[in-house]
Image: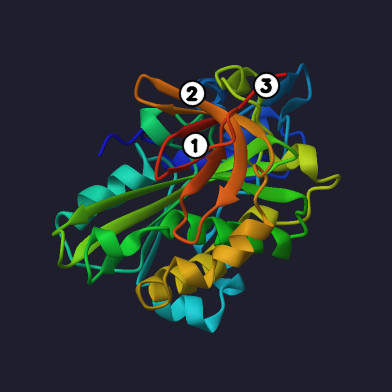
Amino acid sequence: MGFVFISENQKKIINILADGKLHSGTELAEKVGVSRSAICKQLKYLTELGVEFSAITGKGYRLKKILQLLSNAEIKNYLTPESLLLISELEIYSSINSTNNYLVELSQQTKKTGVVCIAEYQTAGKGRRGREWVSPFGSNIYLSILWQFMNGPASLSGLSLAVGVAVIRALKDCGIDDVGLKWPNDIYWQQRKLAGILIEVSGESGGPCSAVIGLGLNFYLPKDKAKLITQDWVDLSQILIDDPANLRNKLAAALLNHLMPIIANFEQQGMQHYIDEWRSYDCMKGKDVQIFIGQQIFSGKVAGVDDSGLLLLTDEQGHNKAFASGEVSFSKI
C-alpha cells in the first residue's frame, strides 16, 4: 500500500510532545524506554515527515505548534447516531500512501460500504489532474469514504457539488464562516483554497458501482511545506484566532455527520436537492475566469451553474457556454 512506517516509539514521542510543552531528552528517553541517542534519531525522522520541533539547549524539545492527534474514540464521541449507523468501519492510519488510493484498492476486493479512512500523513496524496496534495504529518485532514451505489456512475452526476455543500455545513458548525464553493470540487475562504474534493468511481455503466469520496482540508501548513503549493491557499490556523481544544477531531466528526447522510441518500435525492444551497455558496459567480480543457482555454465571466450542475460561462461576445468539466482559474488582473 506504500505506507511509511511510524513506530510505536515515534507515536509515544509525538503523544508526549503533543501538549506543546518542553520535554527534556532524558524525560523522553525514560518515558519511551530508549536511549537519548535513539530519541535524537527518532526526532530527526519525524522532522522529515513534517513534524516541526524546537530544541532549546539544556531544556529540551517541544513542538512549534501543538498537535491535535486524531482519535477514533474522540471522533466517534462527536458523531450523530445516524452517522454511526452509516459508518461500517472508521480506520485511522498514522501513515498511508493516500486515503483515496487505499479505498480504491479496497473497493476492488470487497463490496463493503460506509468505510471511512482518515490519515495523519500521506506519502502520495493527490488532488485533481494528479497533482500532489501537500501532506505534512498531523497537520491537516485527509479523509476518504467508500460507498456502494446501485445505479451506475451516471446516477452520480453532481455528487461533488453535493459533497461541497456538506463540507460547508460542517465548517459552519465549527464556527468557520466566509467559506464558499469553487466549481466543481474546491472549498475556498476569501478567494484562497482551503480544501479540495476528489471523487473516483468504478463499476458497470448501468449497474452497481463503487465511489471513493476524498477530502483534503488544510488545518495547518508549515511554511516550508507550503512553498510547494502553486496556487493561493489558506489553512484554518490563519482563519481562526484561537485553536479550540480538540478542533481537529470535532471537525473530522462534523464532516462525517454531514457527508454520510448526503452520500447515503444521493441516489434518491440527486443533486437537485442541493443545487440552490450550492448556489448560495458560489464564490465564482460574476468573476472573470479561464477554463482549461486539455490544450484549450476558454475565457469569460461566470454566470453560475445550471440545474444540471454545469458551469455557465459568458464570453466577450455575450454568448453563454456550459461546461461539464474543466480546470477553472481565476483571471489575474
Residue under pointer 2:
45
At 77% from the left edge and 50% from the top edge, which residue is drawn? 178
Instruction: Judge by depth and name the residue closer to the eye, 133 or 65.
Output: 133
Instruction: Judge by depth and name the residue closer to the eye, 324 or 11.
Output: 324
Residue under pointer 3:
223
Q: Counting residues from the N terminus, which is met first, the one under dot 1 or under dot 3?
A: 1
At 73% from the left edge and 18% from the top edge, which residue is drawn? 333
C-alpha span from label 3 to label 2: 19 Å
Drawn side of residue 333 relative to residue 302, left or right: right
Q: Counting residues from the N terminus, which is met first, the one under dot 2 or under dot 1?
A: 1
x and y percent of residue 292 in the render? 44, 26
Q: Amino acid at mark 2?
A: Tyr
Drawn side of residue 90 relative to residue 161, left or right: left
Quadrant housing the N terminus = top left
* Snapshot quadrant of residue 2: top left
Relative vertical location of residue 219 with respect to residue 90 in this rendering, above or below: above
